[in-house]
Amino acid sequence: MKSFEYVITDPVGIHARPAGIMVKEIKNYLSTVTIAKGEKSVNAKKLMALMGMGIKQGDTVTVCVEGEDEEEVAPKLEQFFKDNF
Amino acid sequence: MISIQGKGVSTGVAIGPLYYYQRAKSTIVRTTVADTEAEWQRFKAAQEKAIEQLGELAEKARVEAGDEAALLFETHQMMAEDLDYEESIEGMIKDDQMNAEAAVIDTAAVFADMFAQMDDAYMQARAADVKDVSNRIISVLTGAVQGGINSPVPVILAADDLAPSETVQLDKSKILGFVTEGGSGSSHTAILARTMGIPAIIGVGDQMKPEFEGREVIIDGSTGHVIVDADEDTKKYMMEKRAEQIRVRKMLEELKGKENVTLDGRTMRVYCNIGSPEDVSAVLSNDGGGVGLFRSEFLYLNCDDYPSEDYQFEAYKKALSDMGGKEVIIRTLDIGADKQIGYFNMPHEENPALGNRALRICLNRPEIFKTQLRALYRASAYGKLGIMFPMVTSVWEVKEAKKMCEVVKKELTAEGIPYSDEVELGIMIETPAAVLMSDRLAKIVDFFSCGTNDLTQYKLACDRQNNDLGRFFNPHHPAVLRALKMVCDNAHKNGVWVGICGELGADLELTETFLSIGIDELSVSPRSVLPLRQKIRSINLGEVKDKVLEALLTDEISV
């Protein structure tokens, strides 16, 4: 399992459009991706559940990638967070 | 006439018949299904169809309003195939034997509710997205046609609230503007209306009545006003406002961001005349390069007693910071003559135009002058400030005024209050004396600004307020134009720039003359900026210059 922490810098937090793009992207991978904030965590393939977490600017999220292609997926995802959130 | 106040979320004025959006009725029938697998497949087919429709809408939005608008529908696509959403519907159909329509509506309610409960306006607005997506699936399931406009003429469209997909599917050629009962400024409807340049007013609530359908309505997106059956005066006013907006928008499309430059490369700065900090928005929306004349009199006219330093400071600071670093030239107090203020207790004068006015008052009553200069220098820390003194006749007056500036700067330094070291100091050229002394005056200032109304009045010894003198008061008189040329020549020899801040600056018949004699800046009312830019860009200075300068040597013509 690979994981990284990320502090949200986007003023709107994890909002619909980039979240949607991410969900689409993750569907191409074999790994399971979970995004956790505090106690709550969701499967990153679930757009509305992800949006429902209400992740805001300044929040720290932990992203876990688990599966055959985790080595390849984790850095890609980290970059995606930096570019979009 | 009925006047309704809503919230304007997209600017512009529109006039036309009111039309209520025809929505496909989506009252659904709830049934218990026996073959749940077949019902689930019926949902899957409808979901697929909805996703396909959303893809088409995304492409339509991309063409009409760009990638941003298209992304919205792509997000809707993802919501339609969201795993939790689908799972919830599947559960309701397979476990609870609900029909697909009911399962979609109930699931939509759960998710919309989740978003609505969030303490974040952006996420709350997403509740509408979930409902919109769900309604689309239901429409496919029930075979309902999407609603629309069935009117031969363009209309002002009214609705309780328009879903984003509804606004995109509408025939744009039929819509003049939107009025909705509900909605928020961050709803997709508001965003799309702005992107598409259609005026929109939201949140009019139940003031909007179905019986208004078909009646003439005027909406003003900048004020949020909705007027039903406007009276003649209101209609005339709004039509003028509309014509003005269309004119500016059209000109802006052609000219915004372009230089004020002649065909052969001579540039002219085009600035604006304003009377209060609130006018700055007009300067920016008309693409003015700066403020060439900010009349400070309003501060004095608005008060019952001498305005305090802080009060003045706030007003100057606002104008400077709102202009975002573009130059703002503020003229010091210019009262007397035709502008009198009670609390100044000025004794009656036989000849006020030649009396105690403008800089003369300031030099006679230094305490008033100093308060204004302190406010100005304090404000100079917030932008690019120029200060100009009106009604100058002598070199000593300017020296005395500049001395006061030095005193003020020294005080501020001692008090540790910041100010800019790069404040330009200039004078108005309004009197024949200032014209004739311009070679000397140019040595002690940074710029000249010619006030052509007073200059004409004093040059021609002709009262500008006396209507009987109409044909004698001629700002095109060669005496006035020669004076301007003399001022330019003397200024340029000393590295000083020259502007015109009188009404004459916007006179397009003289633009060639101003360019030819060497005027560097024209300061005009904001609405004149773009016509002037258009004029300047049409001139080939090399071709006309000699002819124009020759005309200054000919006889004057009666007007």
Image (cartoon, coloured by chain):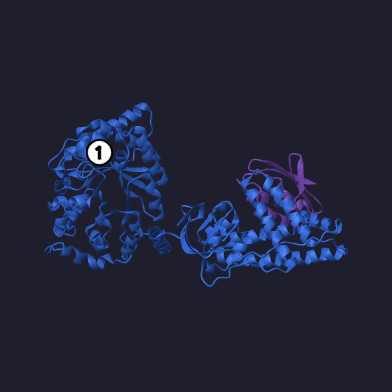
Chain colours: A purple, B blue
Give the x, y percent position of residue B457: 16, 51
- Please say if B297 is above or below B168: above
Give the x, y percent position of residue B139: 71, 65
Q: Secondary structure at mark 1?
A: loop
Viewer-side residue, A15 vs B120: B120
For the image, the number of numbered tags is 1
Q: Please, which chain is the residue tagged with disc 1 on?
A: B
- Please say if B2 is above or below B393: below
Viewer-side residue, B393 vs B25: B25
Position of B403 with respect to B323 (left or right) is: left
Position of B48 with respect to B325 (left or right) is: right
Residue B507 visible in the displayed image: yes
Give the x, y percent position of residue B346: 19, 35
The residue beneath circle 1 is B341
Q: Quadrant of residue B66?
A: bottom right
Position of B84 with respect to B551 (left or right) is: right
Amino acid type shown at disc 1 = Ile
- Please say if A41 is above or below B19: above
- Please say if B534 is above or below B300: below
Give the x, y percent position of residue B298: 31, 42
